[in-house]
Image: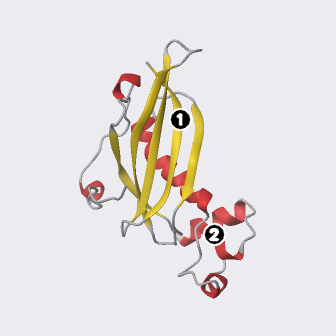
Amino acid sequence: MGGSTHDPGQSASEPVSAGRFNRYDDFTVGRRFDHHWGRTIMAEEAISFATQHVVHEPLRFNRLYAHHLGYNDIVVSSMLVYAIVLGLSVEDLSESGGPFLGSDEVRFLAPVYPGDTVFASSIVVSRRPSASKQDYGIVEWETSSWNQGGEPVISFRRTNLVRR
């Protein structure tokens, strides 16, 4: 899945109302959500994330070492990329509440460098009523993300309880 349908200038010029309050019935299997915000990741936050999370890989904060290993720049921590992409999907998928049940099949597909902008979309892959909470359903999405050049960088499945 790439970003061919995404207009990167759209969110900068057109106001978008904040907050989606989707309910269980809004999440039909196969429905696609193109998350309208892209997110540029800066070197300072990548280094700060590595430092604060005690990631002692020089690849994450030493440009010369990263170049020595053949990378273009320091490589942004995969967990920071995951957190950012998950955050991009919240407004469309889970902002109206319901507990986050987890992620599966997380695949890191390409390195992300400072200055890269990531975009994301999600597709509803399954849904079912909750057996234990009558007023909730369980919805699973597959989220894919790509950089400004259209190169896939991460994909994962996530599941939430969603109010019915």
Are the residues tagged 2 and 1 within 8 Å (C-beta)?
A: no
Q: Specify the quadrant of the image occupied by residue 19.
A: top left
Helix, strand or loop at mark 1: strand
Which residue is situated farthest in the top direction here?
Answer: 134
Image x and y of residue 111, in percent: 54, 69
Left or right side of 32 for 77: right
Which residue is located at x 50 percent, y 28 percent?
97
Q: Specify the quadrant of the image occupied by residue 62.
A: bottom right
**Residue 159 disc label:** 1
Figure check: 17 above or below 144: above
Image x and y of residue 25, in percent: 36, 23
Residue labelled with disc 2? 47
**Pair 2/1: label in front:** 1
Which residue is located at x 53 percent, y 40 percent?
158
Q: Quadrant of the C terminus?
A: top left
Which residue is located at x 29 percent, y 54 percent?
11
Disc 2 to disc 1, C-alpha distance = 30 Å
Helix, strand or loop at mark 2: helix
Q: Quadrant of the N terminus?
A: bottom left
Q: Amino acid at mark 1?
A: Thr
**Residue 31 disc label:** none
Image x and y of residue 56, in percent: 75, 69
Q: Amino acid at mark 2?
A: Ile
Going from N to C along the chain, the mark reached first, 2 or 1, is 2
Q: Specify the quadrant of the image occupied by residue 13.
A: bottom left
Which residue is located at x 66 percent, y 75 percent?
59
